[in-house]
Amino acid sequence: MSLSNNLRKYLVMGSQNCKRDPQVILKEAIEGGITAFQYREKGPGSLTGKEKLELGARLREICKAHDVLFFINDDLDLAEPLKADGIHVGQEDEHVEKVRELFQDKIIGLSVSNTAELLQSPIDKVDYLGAGPIFSTQTKKDAKPVTGTEWVKVLKHSFPDLPIVGIGGIHPGNAAAVIESGASGVAVVSAITHSKDIKKAIAEL
């Protein structure tokens, strides 16, 4: 399966996003059809140290058993212990050039929210771009200004061969618009973690 296809339904989650056991949510999400998972243990209420590593290891094993891509969010010290398939970084995280230098064999994704960020980013070092926040989101308290689906079109026009993943406020009711604008996939958090029917939510993404 190509990277574009593997990024089609992309769950981003840490324990702080879950009202139930994260392992149960991940298993249900995989059964429902997610194609990639990013372990993002960050923000108020998140685990640290040994507990963070141990939960990551359990989630990693679930992904491995079901052949689902496993990414970590910017926690470079988790990349090797968890044998992550990839790393996703934001503009304020470790610089992409350093990440690529350290992890030449891993898939690297980079978030870009506007033209200024795009111009200062070494796009040739990454394997896919995270575009957003496409819509208003409550998950990230420090979220940047909403970009709308037009931003996906801009990125796709500029980098036609690079997979684009839309993120930010995406749910079953608006995911189609993101894909129609040229995105290879959609990344979601609460649309899955807070859903009463995870499989139904994923089917509609």
Image (spheres, rainbow, N blue to C red):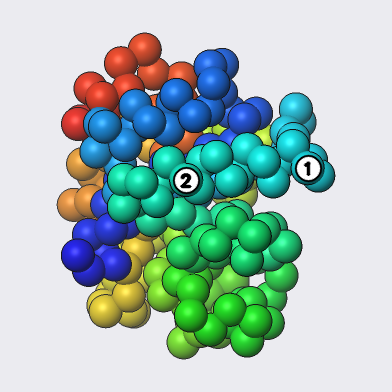
Q: Residue at x 65, y 81 (%)?
A: 102
In this rendered view, identify the residue nearer to me: 162 or 180: 162
Residue at left offset 65%, top offset 29%: 16
Q: Is residue 11 above or below residue 197?
A: below
Number of numbered callouts drawn: 2
Give residue 156's position: percent from left, percent from top: 30, 70
The residue identified by callout 1 is: 50
Q: Note whether residue 49 is visible.
A: yes
Instruction: Name the foreground residue: 69 vs 100.
Output: 69
Q: Find disc 2 in the rendering and name its residue.
A: 61
Q: Where in the figure is residue 170, as x and y percent of width and height?
A: 38, 37
Q: Crowding near pointer 2: few (<14 within 10 Å), some, many (20+)?
A: some
| Above or below for 4 versus 116 | above
Q: Is residue 148 above or below residue 87?
A: above
Is 115 positioned to the left or the right of 42 in the image?
A: left
Q: Amino acid at mark 1?
A: Lys
> Which image quadrant for residue 7?
bottom left
CA gap, disc 2 and disc 1? 17 Å
Dots 2, 1 in contact, CB < 8 A: no
Q: Amino acid at mark 2?
A: Glu
- Locate residue 127, reporting x and y percent: 41, 75
Q: Secondary structure at mark 2?
A: helix
Quadrant (top left/top right/bottom left/bottom right) for the N terminus: bottom left
> At which x and y percent is residue 2?
22, 68
Q: Residue furthest top?
A: 196
Determine whether the residue tagged by mark 1 lies in a helix, strand or loop.
helix
Q: Quadrant of the C terminus?
A: top left
